[in-house]
Image (spheres, rainbow, N blue to C red):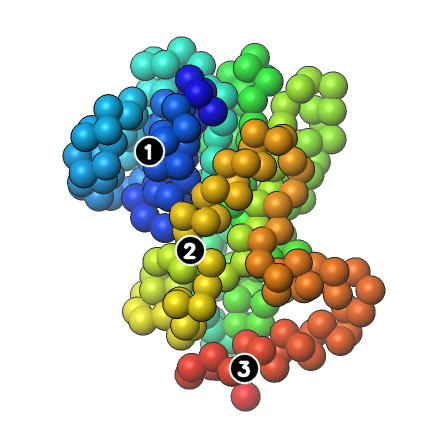
Amino acid sequence: MNGKIVIVTGASSGIGLACAKEFASRGAKVVLSARRLELLEKEKSEFFDPKGFDCLLVKTDVSKEDDCKLLIEKTVEKYGTIDVLVNNAGISMRALFADLHLDVIRRLMDVNFWGTVFCTKYALPYLLKSKGSVVAVSSIAGFSGLPARTGYSASKFAIHGFLEALRIENLKTGLHVLIAAPGFTASDIRKTALAPDGSAQGETPRDESKMMSAEEVAKHITNSIIKRKRTLVLTSTGKLTVRIKKFFPGWLDKLTYNHMAKEEDSPLK
């Protein structure tokens, strides 16, 4: 990663921030993007500046095409090229579809799917020149739908289809495409997950202490970029889920339902 120019969206917390720190510690010049610039500035002053890491902060709402275009323009203006784009910005939800306001799914698609599309579109010319990497921080929900997460699962399935097609289109260009599915990770995404009416869920219903840390996920993602892997599936549960899905999908439906129904205040009966 030494000397590489890396953009990370959703870099103010969780997996995005952990990735930005991991890339910087390996010698990359990192562009941190998020909606809350004050959080990025805090991390810059506390982690990046003291260690002399080269970084750029860009306030970005990835659901807005113009913001994504500006992110790419500011990166190229400062560094001249792009080697890695990590599409990490995302939001989640927790509600039965029957109870869900449709605007919640629109918001999820705008951030998770369209944010990935917008950033990738404007970064692509530079990534083709550098034979760089497009990365999506996805989810096991992109391989197997999760109950009470219809919008989230839909957005992740859409990302997979988009990037798989992009990978095939670029088989002869040298572009690297990585779909990373971390599984349940200790991060803020569940605390900010949307409730049926679109409000923030608040406290996570899952035990974060038993999950893989964002820092560990970041190390796996970084190594997968270096090795130019096509897919990264993390955690034993995640790997088992993907395997069972191929051979026993009906059984997996029952396992998934029973597992998710055990969440505190689960909407599943």
How far across and down, in percent of the image, does residue 138 sit?
Answer: 54, 49
Q: Which amino acid does label 1 sit on?
A: Leu
Residue to which mark 2 is pinned:
213
Q: Mark 2 against mark 3, which lies toward the viewer? A: 2
Quadrant of res 190: bottom left
How far across and down, in percent of the image, does residue 201 sit?
Answer: 34, 69
Residue to which mark 3 is pinned:
261
Which residue is at the front of the view, 101 or 52?
A: 52
Which residue is at the front of the view, 209 or 121?
A: 209
Which residue is at the front of the view, 268 or 244?
A: 244
Residue to which mark 1 is pinned:
32
How far apart in space, not on screen, are marks 2 and 1 (Cα)?
A: 20 Å
Q: Which of marks 3 and 1 is nearer the N terminus?
A: 1
Q: Which of marks 2 and 3 is nearer the N terminus?
A: 2
> What label does residue 223 carry, if any?
none
How far apart in space, not on screen, are marks 2 and 3 (Cα)?
A: 24 Å
